[in-house]
Every structure is written in C-alpha cells, then in structure tokens.
Amino acid sequence: MPNEPAVQMFNVQIDGVWHRFPKGTRVIEACEQVGVFVPRYCYHKMLSSPGNCRMCLIEMGFPRLGPDRKPELGTDGKPIINWMPRPQICCAQDVAEGIAVRTDSPLVKECQRGVMEFLLINHPLDCPICDQAGECRLQEFSVDYGTSQSRFLENKVKKPKAVQVGPRVTLDDERCILCSRCIRFCQEIAHDDVLGFVDRGSHTVLTAHPGKSLDNNYSLNTVDICPVGALTSTDFRFKMRVWFLKETKSICTSCATGCNTVIGTREDVIYRQTPRENDDVNSCWMCDYGRLNYKYLEAEDRLLEPRIRSDGKLVPADWPTAIGQAALHLKQFAASEIAIVASGRMTNEELWLTAQLASSLGVKCIDIVPRRGRGDKILLSKDRNPNTNGVRLILGSRSAPGAKLMAIADAVRSGEIKALVILKENAMHLGLSVEELARLPALIVMNILRNAATEKASVVLPACGFAEKRGSMVNGKGRLQRLNRATRPPGNARDDWEILRDLLQGIDGGDSLHSIEDVFRRIRETVPQFAGLSLSKIGDLGVHILKIEELPATHPSDEEAIEQAIAVQAARRSVRSDLDRAYANPAESITRQAEAQTAPRR
Amino acid sequence: MAITVPRPRLTWRERWYLPTIAAGLAITFKHFKNTLLGRTKVTMEYPEQKWDAHLPDYYRGAPALVSDAGGRVRCVACQLCEFICPPRAIKIIPGEIPPGDRFAKVEKFPQEFDIDMIRCIYCGMCEEVCPEQAIFLRKDYAITGFTRADMVHHKEKLLEIGGVMHGVVLKWNEKK
C-alpha cells in the first residue's frame, strides 16, 4: 500500500540465517516468526518484559566494523559478526540492524540447563497432584532443556500452600517460579494492582497486597498465564486432569463481546472454559463472569423432555407429538392474536427460522428481551445479549431491542394476544404474573431451564445451551463468529434450530432444510451482510460483516467499551517501556507502589 | 499352483491296523490301572486345592491399592492409571484432603476409585505408570460375582486386596 508509512526493516541473523524484521520486533518474537522457539517463563507477548526468569538467554553479536566504520564483509558478502562473550536475554531486546543471535550454541544450552536447575531447586515434586501437569511449561522445558537428575540434596524451602489469593484463584507459593506474569497482568491489563512479591532470595513469595484480594473480574486470566501450577482456578482445582479434556473451539455467549474460547469437556461434562487468542476480539483474555457462566447447563432444573398440557397437567410427550401440538395451537389463532418473544442469545440460524415462523404465521408482534448490565472498559460489554446485532440483521427490527415488550405484555393482559411463543427466555421477564400466563389459551415455551413460566406452558420444548449446539452469532463489533458443539444435550433435549425447523414445517409444510448449513445458505440469500459466507468459511476467528457505521446508534456502549479496550491495549505498548525501566530499577518501582497505595482506589 | 503331496508308503503291519490298536489300548489300560491304584492324578481338585503356592513372582493378578505404614492411602488421584488403562477399566473421582487433616500436605486423594474387573485385562500398565507406587497387581485371580456391579472393585475392596505396603515415599514427608 503506497500511502502507508514505510516501516524500517532490519537485517537480523538467527542461527546463521539472515532475515528481515520491522523495527520494534522483539528478538524473541523474531525468532518465533522464523520457527526458532526460545524457551521463556516471564515473557508474554501481551505484557511488558521484565526479563526476570533468564530462560530466554541467547548469544548475541554485532557486525564487526572496519576502520571506516562500515561492517566488514565476509566471503559470502554478509557482515562478519563479533560475538559478545556473555549470554543475553532476548525477550527485552528489540531487533537492530545487523545483529545476530545464536539460540542453540553450547553456551546457550549450558545457560538453559543452569536456569532450569535453579528453577527446580525449590520446586516441589508434586506433579501427580498439580492441576497444571500436562500443560506446565516447567514440565515441558525440564524435558527439553533440563537434566534428568537433581543435584540438590538440601531440604526445599517451605512456603504457604493453598492460599486463597482471591475468591476464584488458589495460590501455591512453593510452585511459584517468580516470573511476575500475574503481577504484570493485574497492573497492565486488569488495571487492579493487587499482587506483588515479598521477602528476599529463596524466600520470596507471591502474595496479595495487604488488605487486598485478587477479586477483579479478570482474575482467572492469571491462572491461564501462570506457566506453572502456582495459580490455579478454585473452580477447576482437582476436578479433572487436563489431558482428559476434549477441547472445542467456541465463543463466550455471556455478553456482546463474544470472546473466543476453548471449552474443555470430558464425557459430556464441561470442566472449564479458557480464552482463545483473537487479536480482533479479546486478545488473550476473557472475564471470569463469562468463563464460569456454564454451570447452568448442568443444573438440576434442566428441561429434559418435551411436555404438553393434557387435562390441565403437563405430561411428557415425544417430539413429533409436542411439535404437532405446538403447530396446532398456533394454527388456530389469527396472526394478530399471536406474539413471539425471541432471545438475543439465539444464534443467527435460530433467529432466521424464527423470522420464517413469524412470516409464515403473519405475526408482526415479535421482539427480544434486552439484557443490559454494567460494562467495564476492558472486555465486558454493557449488552449482555451475545447476538443483538444478529437480531437486528435477521429479524430486521428497526426499533431498539425490547421496545415492543411492554405492548406485548399489555396485549396478553387484555386478551388481545391469545398465543404467546417464548423462545429461550423466561416469560416472567415480560412483567407478566404466573396467573396472567396461566390464563393464556396457548403458551409455547422453548427453553433450557425450568421456571415458573414453563410450568404454565401449553407446550414445553427443551432446547440446547451454547456449548451443545452449532451456529453463528454477530458480536457487538459486527464480527460474525461460530459456536461449536462441545457436549451432547442431556436427556431428550434437542438442537434449537431443529425444533424451530420442525415447528416451521409443521405450519407451512415445507421440507427443504436438512442441516444447519442449509439454514445458513438461506440466510445468505436474504441477508446481504452474510453474502459469500458459510459456516465453515467463518473459520475459528470469525469475519467482520458490519462496518462501524452500520452498527446501531441505539446502543453504542458496546462498541465504545471495545474501542476503549483496544485503546488501552495500544496505550499499553507505550507504557511497556517505562514499566520495563521500573522493573530494571527497583527503587523507582517501590516509589510507584507507594504512589499507588496512597492514591485513592479506582 | 497345486502341490501333490505324496502319500506315505505303509508297511503291511500298518495297513493291518490291529497291532497299532492293541498298542494304543495297552497305554489306555496302563493309565486305567495307575488311576485305580492312585498312582497318577489327572485333575487338581479346585477350589479345595489351589495352585497359589506355585504362582511365579511375576504373576499378574487383580490390581489393588495399597496404604502405607502410616495408614495413608498412597494414591493421590493423579489419574495416570485411568489415562493409560487400555480397556478403560479405571474410574477415579478425585477429592481434596481438608486442611487440618493429618495428611493435609498431600492435598489430593481419590474420593472414588473403581476398577471394572470385567474390563480389566491384567496388563499391569497401571502399576507401571503409577508415580506414587500406589497400585500393584496382586496374585488374586479368582475374581467372581453374580452381577456386573459385583465385578466393579470399589476403593474399599481394592484396599482390602492391596493391604499395607512398607517402605516410604519420601516426598510427602513433612521434612521434604
């Protein structure tokens, strides 16, 4: 692109091969880009580089300069390198013109072996009970770079174990290798400075500042970035070994941000959710609220079988009967007597089928339940519905979500509406009482959990949670992302899109939708933003389908929150350098801490 | 290609059959006489008699959990045996040892430890993989039951078969 400012490129020799990298690239990243992995504990690409683990030691050299201050060239026409006689960390070193690094020389290997030995001196041998085992950097690098034997005969240092450093995080200080990733995460990403090191030498321990606790909404990210088992999730602690987990790429559906996730399951039980890197959405992080918001899928009050009302009582029925009953109910009312309440938690495919259902019945009265909460400036959006933009695109509603709900509730009370279809929402949220719902001639409910409203329904259709189905959603920034199925639905519950498809076919008699891909193909024909896409083309990282100006003006808070989060990320890069300086100069960092303590807490 | 196998050329004695029949019957009568006189034993009277004393040291019988001399179940529920088990016979539900317990330092223990002896193939992988020397194949081979549920060895049964293992695993000592 001609208008882009030219980035200065530097020649760098890595393990004897010359490459070119843009100015500002860290040497450790440059190595990684050309497929040379340098082991590291403290370095994390989203955080500042204090350089305190010493695992990424390499040999570095500069071009030898002749008397004319020009690099002397060898027989191959490349500069001759003068190697520094000592190793150097590569995580805090930017590339420069002509520098050369060796990552596998005998000196480097000796350094790595030495660092590993020091790190393991006081590390307990409790891998069999450690939750990190299997995804532990210390285990991995011990095999790759360490020795098989310990020369340490003395007793290991005793440190606090199983410390509740926060409501969701358990700390084992004996396992901590003092990399300070968690401290930097709290300072730089979560903006909540709670963790720090106290005491000296081998007795240094990680702890929360006096009177503080690691209770911010991003605390579990420290567990993800902890390279060892020092910080573990209290929720996941001792539940399941990581090597049993089946990992399914999906997205979080707890707010409009739609953080990319990996769902860890075994035998249809979800054990944990972890963030998946996507620089356009959530970087490497996700909030604790979204991460732990999966328990309801295994709740006692899951709806497990379709039920129909017979002689005033809800009785179990098979699927064709329940669907037939629902279609029968809907067909006996005029279009003006039916209202549909959909959900911003439904996928695009389900919403499209809902729209088809509404149009085949002629129903105009259709809306979703808005769900708003406090957003933060990091990831959590004010809009807690994951697919509000999908609703806007597919249901084609002009008004703000939830604008018609009051009217629907009033019409139910006055008896104008005789049939109410509630999809994935609690009818009580409309402000209707149980008695008012019980008076409805037809109440068709598709939901996951049992509630007071489902008990008054004419037909109950048990559906799937976010981890049990496939589909796509459009996040607050207009990015189309994909959900994948991690577990099978419990009992006789069915995929939402199949229920809606069968209901639609029970009403209009059609028979053309056989797979969720068919539904997506039909969306593609009607919604221009989906043109040229398919479920598989969305990919793991999603695609942007809405431009900023296409995003609704009715609730700009989502985008604001995300834009600000991006701004914070960008600002962090400039902050990084002076934080580096602070780590290099402990006196200065102590003053900073003192300032932080005197300053009023945000 | 078809191969023509030459028939053996039999002698006149062999073609006659009778001498061979007589020789065979002689052997039969010899055994008959010895059995009547109690000189040879053809069967072992299991289960009144057992061959336990003759089992070799390397015999692989039922897997079992052991406790150490201090009364601690050695297993820490690392689930490596569950992972390695080829027929997936092992199922473990880990639990946390409450703080204040005598063995609180170990932190983790098996709340439930089931081995489905219908599935078990006595391969000994669990014993080999165990980092805590907590599971061993004992010499019990007569694993029977009337129902499938009977054939699942729960933790109590496994500890009963396993008994106490002497010799300490140093790493859980308070000093280490």
Image: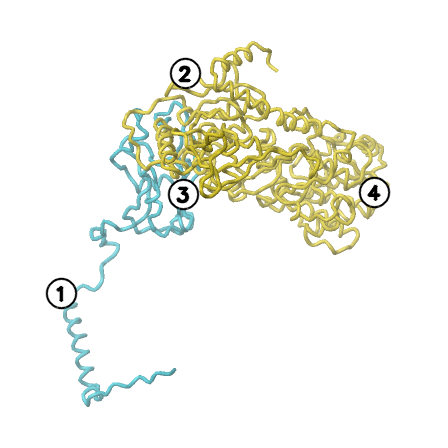
Chain colours: A yellow, B cyan
Q: In this rendering, does residue A158 appear at all?
A: yes
| Category of crowding for the residue at label 3, using alpha-carbon neighbours closer than 10 angstroms: few (below 14), some (14–19), many (at least 20) | some
The answer to which of A98 and A235 lies nearer the viewer is: A98
The answer to which of A82 and B160 lies nearer the viewer is: A82
For the residues labelled 2 and 3, the Cα–Cα distance comes to 45 Å
Q: Which residue is mark 2?
A: A199
Instruction: Name above or below for residue A15 compared with residue A574.
Output: below
Q: Which residue is mark 3?
A: B114
**Does label 3 or label 1 sit earlier along the sequence?**
1
**Which of the 4 image quadrants contains residue A426?**
top right
Foreground tag (4 vs 1): 4
Foreground tag (2 vs 1): 2
Q: Which residue is mark 4?
A: A363
Q: Position of residue A298 (x, y in %)?
A: 57, 37
> Looking at the picture, do discs 3 and 4 lie on one chain?
no
The answer to which of A103 and B7 lies nearer the viewer is: A103
Q: Residue at 22% x, 62% y: name it.
A: B43
Q: Chain of mark 3?
A: B
Q: Residue furthest front?
A: A68
**Does label 4 or label 2 sit earlier along the sequence?**
2
Q: Chain of mark 1?
A: B
For the residues labelled 4 and 1, the Cα–Cα distance comes to 98 Å
Q: Which residue is mark 1?
A: B39
Foreground tag (2 vs 3): 2
Foreground tag (3 vs 4): 4
Which quadrant of the figure contains the C terminus of chain B?
Answer: top left
The amino acid sitting under disc 1 is: Arg
